[in-house]
Amino acid sequence: MVSLAKIRDVAKEAGVSVGTVSMVLNHADYGSPTIREKVQKAVKKLQYVPSEMARSLSLKRTMTVGIIVPTVAHPFFAELVEGLEESLYRLGYKTMLCCTRQKENAEHVFIEMLQRQNMDGIIMGAHSLDTSIYEGLKQPVLAFDRYLSPDIPVVHADHVLGGRLAAQAFLQHNCQHIVEISGSQKVKTPAGEYHQAFNEVMQAHGVRTDIVSLPWNAFGFKESLELAEKIFAEYSDVDGILGSDVSVSSCLEVAVRRGIKVPEQLKLVAYDGTFITQNGICRLTAVRQPIFELAETAAQKIVAMINGQQDNLPLVLPPSLLPGETC
C-alpha cells in the first residue's frame, strides 16, 4: 500500500514550516521566489496532493459557485451552464446547479446555503418573480440577464444592438407585418430591450408589429408549438416572425405543415443563436448572443467578487447576426 505524503512531509523536505507550505500552496504570491521553488520541488518529489477540505478551511472558502437557471432542457440555458461550468473549473471552482422550473423554494435553499457559507457565490439567471430574497445580501451574487436589485451587477448581451440587427434582417426583405414572440412580461430582464429597439426601427419604417407573449416559465417546444398555431390562426397576413430559437423553430415546423413557404412567403429570425438554429429543417437566420463569452465573463466576475477584487470586465457584450436560410 502506497503511503500518501502529508503536508508536514513537504515542510520537512523543503526545510520550511508547515504554515509556510500552506501559505505558498494557497497564495501564489506568498514568500520569496526561493521559498516557493523549494516548496514546489518538494510537492513534486513527494507527489503531494493537497486536501481539498483543508484548503477550503484555510481559505474559509468552499470553492463552489451556485448556478440558478430555470431549466437545462432549453438550448440557451444548456449552453450557458456548459460555459459557466467550464470557465469556473478553469478558475479552480466547482459548480452546484439549481433548476427552478416546477420547484418551490429552490432559490431560497440556495440563498440559505450561501448565507451558511456552503458556497462562495451565486450566478442567478432564473426567471423567478420574487427577487426580494436577493435584497440586502452581503455575499457575492451576480445576475445573468436579470434585474435583481440595484446592488447586484448584471451580465448580458447588448440587446439594443440585437434588436436592431434583427430589424435590419427583416427590412432587407420588405416585410409588412411582423409578429414578435416574447417571454413573460412579468420578468424584469434586459432581454426585453431587444423588442423595444426592434419596434422602434420597425415603426420608423412604417412596418406593423404585434407582440404575443409566452406564459411565465414556458420554455418547452409544446408551449411554443401551441403559440405558433395561434399566431398563424390569428394573423393570416403575417410575413415575418421574431422570437427565441425554440419559438421560431416551432413556427418553422408549423409553417411547413401549413404549406407556407419559407422564406418566400414568411421570413423568420431567431434570437439567441444556439446550436438548434443550425440543425433543423433549414438553418435559421439568427441573432447570436455570445453565450460562451458571456459565461466566461460571468465566471471571472463572480470570482473577482468572491475575492473582494475590483475588475474592469465588461458587463455587456455585443451579439452578431448569423446568416441563414429563413430571412
Image: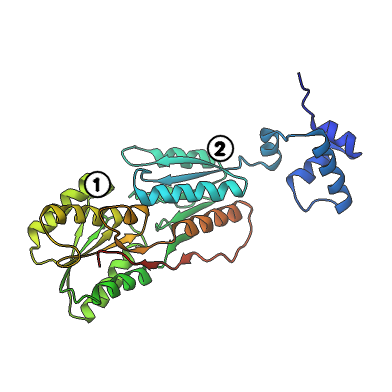
Q: Which mark is residue 118?
A: 2
Instruction: Look at mark 1 in the image and give the residue it sits on.
Output: 221
- At 78% across and 53% down in the image, what residue appears? 29
**Quadrant placement of the N terminus:** top right
Residue at the top extreme? 1
Above-or-below relation of 3 to 129:
above
Q: In x, y percent, where is residue 6?
A: 79, 30
Would residue 312 be visible to someone looking at this image?
Answer: yes
Q: In x, y percent, where is residue 88?
A: 56, 48
Q: Amino acid at mark 2?
A: Asn
Q: Relative to residue 213, is residue 235 drawn left or right?
A: left
Q: Relative to residue 120, is residue 25 drawn left or right?
A: right
Q: Residues within 10 Å of mark 1 (few under 14, many from 20)?
A: some
Q: Nearer the viewer, mark 1 or mark 2?
A: 1
Q: Secondary structure at mark 1?
A: helix
Q: In x, y percent, where is residue 23?
A: 78, 44
Above-or-below relation of 97 to 278:
above
- At 77% across and 34% down in the image, what residue appears? 48
Q: Relative to residue 87, is residue 54 drawn left or right?
A: right
Q: Secondary structure at mark 2?
A: loop
Q: Amino acid at mark 1?
A: Phe
Task: Pick whichever of labels 1 and 2 is earlier in the sequence.
Answer: 2
Q: Relative to residue 250, is residue 193 drawn left or right?
A: right
- At 49% across and 59% down in the image, what residue appears? 293
Above-or-below relation of 57 to 200:
above
Decide which of 123, 2 is in the foreground and name it. Answer: 2
Decide which of 202, 137 is in the foreground and name it. Answer: 202
Would residue 151 be visible to someone looking at this image?
Answer: no
Give the spatial CA distance, label 1 vs label 2: 36 Å
Residue at the right extreme? 15
Q: Answer yes or no: do the residues labelled 1 and 2 have beta carbons within 8 Å?
A: no
**Quadrant placement of the C terminus:** bottom left
